[in-house]
C-alpha cells in the first residue's frame, strides 16, 4: 500500500517555549508573511540542499521564486510535472522524488531537466522489483527505504549499496516507515520493528496499539524515543522507557503538523474540521492559549493543510486547504503584519490611512471603510469606535489635552466631544500649533486654521490649494505642495517660500527637532530627497537617494528621521561632515502590500507603525538592524547566490527548457541551473527574472545588475526583473550586486553568461566572402582596365592608319582628277571641229563651287560657313541669300547634306567603321554623326555596317 503520499500528512513537532515579547498590542513576537499563491493550492514544501524552496501545487512542481514571478504559469516543465504534486524529497544525487495526487512516484533531475516517470525503474537497478503501489520513504541521510510484502530494502543511491531484511510473515505486510536521527521504524500491520543506524540490524520493537484497518497517515519519532502514530483517524503515543502505548479516543485526527525547536517538546496534531490539537512533552493535551510559543499564532486557523519547518532559517511554512500560505519564523520578529478585514466583506481588507497614539498608549487607526479602530495594552482584538462607523477616516490626531480629532472624507473635521468643523470638506492631516491653534490640510481646498479657544475658523491663503503635507516645528507651520515648500506664521498667517530654490513638487516633509533640517520628498513620480538647513540656508547632501520614492516622514524620540519608501524603511542619521547616513531596513510581510502616504507613526518601545492598503505593520527597527549586521557578518565572502533565475523572455516570448525558439533549443536544464545562453543576432532583447530562493534570504537589501562587457553600468532591479535591450554581438556576464541598506557591504554574483552571435554579414564566413569578392573585383577591374588599355592602343593605331589611307586616297584622287582634266583639255584642242562651249548660269556655278569647296574641306571638323564664304570671296550674308535662292537650303544644311552623302558613299562602298567615316567627314563625335545621318536618311549608319557584314 502506498503511504509515501497522503492527502493529509501527519507530522510531529517540537517547539521551544519562548519569552513573550510585546508587539503592537502585546501579542507574540513572531510575525507572519502571507504569500499569495496566485490561485494555486500548495500541498507541500521542501527546501533542497541548493537552498531552493520547491513547492508541490495543484498545478505542478514550481519553485518559490517562480511563484513570486510576474507570470508563474508561463514557465513549463515536463507535462507530467504539471499534475498535482503532494510530496517532494531529495536523494543524495540531487534528484527530486515527487509524488502525484494519483500516488505515482516520479524522479526529476533539475540539472538536466530529465524526468523518470516511474520511480520503479530506478529501484529495479538494485534488483528490487515492486508492485504498482508500495511503501517508500527517504530518511534524513537521503537513503531509500522500500517495503515489498514482508521484505524491507535499504538503498544507498550514492554508493549503489543495498541491504535486505526479511520480516516474519506473522507481522503482516509493511505499511510505512518512520525515520528519526537514530533509527528507522518499520510499521507493519501487526508489529513495529526498529533498525538503528549504528548497527543496521533489525529489532522487534513492539506491537501495534490497535488493529490496522487500511488508513495510515503518518508517524514521528523524537530524539527521546517517543513514537507517535496516526492511523485510522486515531493518534497513539509510545514511550520506549515505559514500553506503554497511550491512545486518545476522543480526538479524531485529520493529518498532522510539525515544527522542530531546541528545547521543550510540544506536538501538534491536525484535527478534523477544527483547530490543531496541542500535546505537551508528557503527552497531555493542552490549550493553545496557555502557551507562549514563538509559532503560536500559526495554529489559529481551522483550515491548515500542512506545515514545513526549515531549521536553517527557523521558518515555519503553513499551507492552507483553501489556497494560500504563510511563513512564521524567528527572523520575522522584526516586524508584524496585521490585516484588518472589512466588517461588511470579510474577504476584503481595510486601508489604514492614518494613526495616532494617546498618552495612555492606546493606538487609534483611521481606516477607509470601518471608521476608527483602536487597541490598547495587551488586548488582542481591535476595538471599533462607534462615532465614525462605516466612514473613511482620512486624518486623526490626539492633542495635548488628550482629545481625539479626526477628519472624515466629505464630512469635515470632528472631535470626540461632539464639535464639528469644516463641514463638507475632506481633512487630510491635522497638526497642533501654539496657543490652541490647529491647522488642517484639506483635499483640494487648501489650509485652514482653527482657534480652539474662540472656535473661529480661518482659511489660509496660499499660492496652491492642492497641499501634500504640513508640519509644525520651531514656532512655524511648514507646508509642501505641488508648487513648492512654504513657511507660515501661525498667528499672522503670513506665508512665503522657505527658499526661492524650493519651488519643486514635494510629497511629504518634516523638520528635525534636533537639527533645524527640513526634509522634503519629491513628488509627481520624481524620486529623491531634498535636505535643507534652515540655519545656514544651505542644502545638505543625501547620497544615493535617487532610487527611493518616499511617502512620509516621522521622527523618533532619539531624533532620528524615518521615512517609508518604495524599498522599505529609511533611517537618516547625522554625520559630522553634514551629510546624511542612510540605512534602509527590510520589511517582511506581503510584498504586494502598498504603504499609504503619510501613514507612519513612532510608537512606544522604539517601534514604528506603518499604514498599508490591507492593514498595518509594526516594525522593530533595532531588531532589523541587528539582524542585518548578523547577515553581513555571516556573509563575508560571497557564498552561494541567494537569487535564482525564474524566467527568461526573449523578444517578449517566454522560453522554457527543451523548447525550440527560432528553430533552436536555448537551454535544456531547469532554469535555475542555467549558466550560459548562446543566442543568435535576432535574440538580443531579453527580460530575465531573478528572485530569492527562500522567503528570508534575498530580502532587506538593494539589488542592481549589469551586463559586464557592455558598458558595465549598474542598473537597479525593478521587481527582480532585469531588462537587456538591443545587446550587441559578443560574450557578456550578467552580474547582480547585493548591497546592504547603507551600502557599506556588497556582494557580486555572476548569474549567467550570455553570448550573442554576430549577424551573418558580420560572421567569419561573411568576412571570407567579402575578401573573396574584393579579390574578384580587383582582378576583374585589372582585367577590364587591361582590355580597355589594349583596345585603346588598337584604336589609336587604326585611326593613324585610317588617316594615312585617307591622305593617300586624297592625293591619288587629286592626281587622277588633274590627269583627267588634262586629258579632256587635250582632247578638246585636238578635235577637228570645235564644239560650242558649255554655258552654266550663275546659280549652277555657285552650287558647283560650293560643292567643290566643301569636298575640299570635308574632313575638317572646324570647317564652317565663314570659311566657305572666304573661299568663295563672298560676304556671308550674300552667300546665304544666293544659296537659299538657288537650292532652297541654308549654307549649314548644304554643308551637312554634302557630308552625309559622302559618308553614305564611304559606308556603302568601303570597308570602314562608323567612327572612321565620322572622322573622315569632319565629325569628332560619333553620336552627333549618327544623329545627323539618321535625320538625313531615316536609318542609322550602323545599319549599313550590319548589312555589309551580312553580305
Image: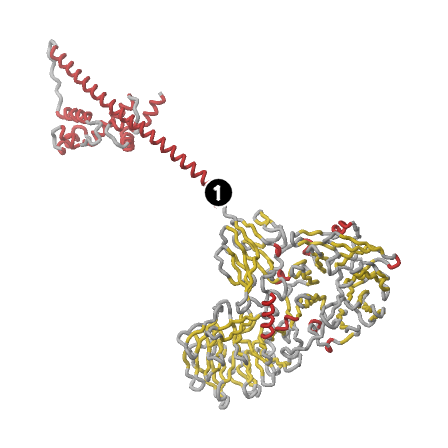
> Residue at position x 40%, y 74% from top?
501
Nearest to the observer: residue 605 or residue 471:
605
Image quarter of residue 747: bottom right
Q: Is residue 267 above or below residue 173?
A: below
Seen in the picture, residue 275 relative to 678 is either above or below; the reply is below
Question: Which x, y percent locates residue 498?
Answer: 42, 78
Residue 75 versus residue 878 in the image, above or below = below
**What residue does disc 1 label?**
766
Residue 423 in the image, given as x and y percentages of width and height: 52, 83
Q: Nearer the viewer, residue 589 or 624?
A: 624
- For the view shown, which residue lies furthest in the front direction? 198
Inspect this view and state whether residue 523 appears: no
Is residue 529 rendered to the left or right of residue 207? left
Quarter of image, res 202: bottom right
- Relative to 409, is 167 on the left or the right? right
Q: Secondary structure at mark 1?
A: helix
Tag count? 1
Q: Quadrant of the N terminus?
A: bottom right
Residue 585 visible? The answer is yes
Graded by Cα atoms within 10 Å as few (under 14), some (14 to 19) or many (20 or more), the crowding at tag 1 reads: few
Q: Percent from the top left, x then y, of residue 170?
A: 89, 58
Give how far across and how far down residue 836 sits, in percent: 11, 15
Amino acid at each position: 500500500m502506498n503511504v509515501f503520499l497522503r492527502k493529509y500528512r501527519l507530522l510531529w513537532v517540537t517547539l521551544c517555549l519562548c519569552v513573550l515579547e510585546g508587539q503592537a498590542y502585546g501579542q507574540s513576537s513572531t510575525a507572519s508573511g502571507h504569500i499569495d499563491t496566485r490561485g494555486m493550492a500548495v500541498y507541500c514544501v521542501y527546501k533542497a540542499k541548493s537552498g531552493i524552496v520547491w513547492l508541490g501545487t495543484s498545478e505542478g512542481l514550481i519553485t518559490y521564486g517562480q511563484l513570486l514571478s510576474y507570470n508563474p504559469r508561463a514557465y513549463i516543465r515536463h507535462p507530467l510535472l504539471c499534475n498535482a504534486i503532494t510530496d517532494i524529497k531529495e536523494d543524495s544525487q540531487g534528484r527530486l522524488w515527487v509524488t502525484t495526487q494519483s500516488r505515482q512516484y516520479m524522479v526529476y533531475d533539475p540539472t538536466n531537466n530529465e524526468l523518470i516517470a516511474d520511480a520503479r525503474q530506478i529501484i529495479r537497478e538494485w534488483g528490487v522489483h515492486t508492485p504498482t503501489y508500495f511503501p517508500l520513504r527517504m530518511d534524513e541521510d537521503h537513503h531509500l527505504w522500500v517495503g515489498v510484502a514482508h521484505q524491507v530494502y535499504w538503498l544507498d543511491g550514492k554508493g549503489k549499496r543495498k541491504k535486505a531484511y526479511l520480516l516474519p510473515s506473522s507481522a503482516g505486510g509493511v505499511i510505512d516507515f518512520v525515520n528519526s536521527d537514530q533509527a528507522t521504524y518499520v510499521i507493519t500491520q501487526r508489529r513495529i520493528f526498529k533498525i538503528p543506524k549504528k548497527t543496521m540490524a533489525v529489532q522487534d520493537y513492539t506491537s501495534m496499539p490497535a488493529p490496522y484497518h487500511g488508513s495510515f497517515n503518518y508517524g514521528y519519532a523524537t530524539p527521546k524515543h517517543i513514537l507517535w502514530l496516526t492511523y485510522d483517524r486515531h493518534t497513539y503515543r509510545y514511550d520506549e522507557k515505559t514500553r506503554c502505548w497511550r491512545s486518545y479516543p476522543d480526538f479524531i485526527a485529520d493529518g498532522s503538523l510539525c515544527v522542530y525547536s531546541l528545547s521543550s517538546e510540544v506536538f501538534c496534531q491536525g484535527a478534523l474540521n477544527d483547530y490543531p490539537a496541542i500535546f505537551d512533552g508528557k503527552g497531555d493535551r493542552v490549550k493553545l492559549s496557555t502557551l507562549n510559543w514563538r509559532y503560536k499564532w500559526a495554529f489559529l486557523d481551522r483550515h491548515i493543510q500542512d506545515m514545513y519547518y526549515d531549521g536553517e532559517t527557523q521558518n515555519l511554512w503553513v499551507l492552507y486547504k483553501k489556497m494560500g500560505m504563510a511563513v512564521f519564523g524567528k527572523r520575522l520578529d522584526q516586524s508584524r503584519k496585521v490585516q484588518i478585514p472589512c466588517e461588511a466583506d470579510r474577504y476584503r481588507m481595510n486601508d489604514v490611512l492614518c494613526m495616532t497614539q494617546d498618552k495612555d498608549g492606546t493606538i487609534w487607526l483611521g481606516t477607509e471603510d470601518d471608521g476608527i479602530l483602536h487597541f490598547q495594552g495587551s488586548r488582542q482584538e481591535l476595538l471599533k469606535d462607534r462615532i465614525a462607523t462605516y466612514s473613511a477616516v482620512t486624518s486623526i490626531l490626539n492633542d495635548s489635552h488628550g482629545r481625539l480629532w479626526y477628519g472624515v472624507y466629505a464630512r469635515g473635521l470632528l472631535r470626540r466631544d461632539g464639535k464639528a468643523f469644516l463641514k463638507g470638506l475632506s481633512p487630510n492631516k491635522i497638526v497642533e500649533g501654539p496657543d490652541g491653534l490647529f491647522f488642517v490640510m484639506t483635499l483640494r481646498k487648501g489650509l485652514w486654521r482653527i482657534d480652539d479657544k474662540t472656535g473661529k475658523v480661518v482659511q489660509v491663503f496660499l499660492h496652491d490649494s492642492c497641499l501634500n503635507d504640513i508640519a509644525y516645528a520651531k514656532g512655524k507651520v511648514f507646508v509642501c505642495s505641488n508648487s513648492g515648500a512654504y513657511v507660515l506664521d501661525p498667528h499672522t498667517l503670513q506665508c512665503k517660500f522657505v527658499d526661492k530654490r524650493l519651488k519643486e513638487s514635494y510629497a511629504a516633509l518634516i523638520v528635525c527637532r534636533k537639527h533645524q533640517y527640513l526634509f522634503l520628498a519629491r513628488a509627481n513620480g520624481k524620486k529623491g530627497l531634498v535636505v535643507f538647513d534652515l540655519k545656514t540656508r544651505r542644502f545638505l547632501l543625501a547620497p544615493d537617494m535617487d532610487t527611493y520614492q518616499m511617502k512620509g516622514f516621522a521622527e523618533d524620540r532619539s531624533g532620528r528621521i524615518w521615512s517609508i519608501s518604495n524599498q522599505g524603511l529609511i533611517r537618516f542619521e547625522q554625520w559630522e561632515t553634514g551629510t546624511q547616513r542612510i540605512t534602509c531596513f527590510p520589511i517582511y510581510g506581503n510584498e504586494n502590500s502598498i504603504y499609504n502616504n503619510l501613514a507612519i507613526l513612532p510608537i512606544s518601545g522604539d517601534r514604528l507603525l506603518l499604514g498599508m492598503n490591507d492593514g498595518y505593520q509594526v516594525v522593530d527597527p533595532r531588531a532589523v538592524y541587528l539582524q542585518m549586521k548578523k547577515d553581513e557578518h555571516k556573509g563575508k565572502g560571497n557564498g552561494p547566490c541567494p537569487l535564482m533565475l525564474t524566467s527568461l523572455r526573449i523578444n517578449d516570448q517566454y522560453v522554457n527548457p527543451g523548447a525550440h525558439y527560432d528553430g533552436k533549443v536555448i537551454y535544456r536544464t531547469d532554469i535555475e541551473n542555467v549558466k550560459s545562453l548562446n543566442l543568435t543576432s535576432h535574440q538580443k532583447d531579453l527580460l530575465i527574472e531573478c528572485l530569492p530562493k527562500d522567503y528570508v534570504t534575498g530580502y532587506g537589501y538593494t539589488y542592481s545588475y549589469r551586463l559586464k562587457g557592455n558598458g558595465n553600468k549598474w542598473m537597479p532591479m525593478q521587481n527582480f526583473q532585469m531588462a537587456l535591450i538591443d545587446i550587441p554581438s559578443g560574450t557578456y556576464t550578467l552580474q547582480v550586486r547585493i548591497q546592504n541598506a547603507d551600502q557599506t557591504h556588497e556582494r557580486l554574483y555572476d548569474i549567467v553568461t550570455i553570448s550573442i552571435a554576430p549577424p551573418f554579414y558580420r560572421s567569419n564566413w561573411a568576412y571570407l566572402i567579402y575578401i573573396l569578392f574584393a579579390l574578384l573585383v580587383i582582378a576583374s577591374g585589372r582585367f577590364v582596365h587591361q582590355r580597355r588599355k589594349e583596345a585603346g592602343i588598337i584604336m589609336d593605331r587604326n585611326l593613324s592608319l585610317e588617316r594615312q589611307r585617307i591622305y593617300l586616297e586624297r592625293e591619288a584622287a587629286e592626281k587622277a582628277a588633274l590627269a583627267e582634266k588634262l586629258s579632256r583639255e587635250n582632247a578638246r584642242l585636238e578635235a577637228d571641229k570645235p564644239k560650242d562651249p558649255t554655258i552654266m548660269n550663275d546659280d549652277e556655278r555657285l552650287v558647283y563651287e560650293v560643292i567643290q569647296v566643301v569636298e575640299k574641306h570635308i574632313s575638317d571638323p572646324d570647317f564652317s560657313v565663314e570659311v566657305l564664304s572666304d573661299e568663295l570671296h563672298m560676304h556671308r550674308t550674300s552667300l546665304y541669300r544666293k544659296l537659299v535662292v538657288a537650292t532652297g537650303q541654308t549654307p549649314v544644311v548644304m554643308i551637312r547634306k554634302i557630308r552625309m552623302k559622302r559618308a553614305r558613299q564611304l559606308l556603302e562602298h568601303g570597308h570602314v567603321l562608323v567612327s572612321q567615316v565620322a572622322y573622315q567627314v569632319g565629325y569628332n563625335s560619333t553620336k552627333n554623326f549618327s544623329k545627323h545621318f539618321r535625320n538625313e536618311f531615316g536609318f542609322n549608319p550602323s545599319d549599313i555596317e550590319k548589312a555589309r557584314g551580312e553580305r
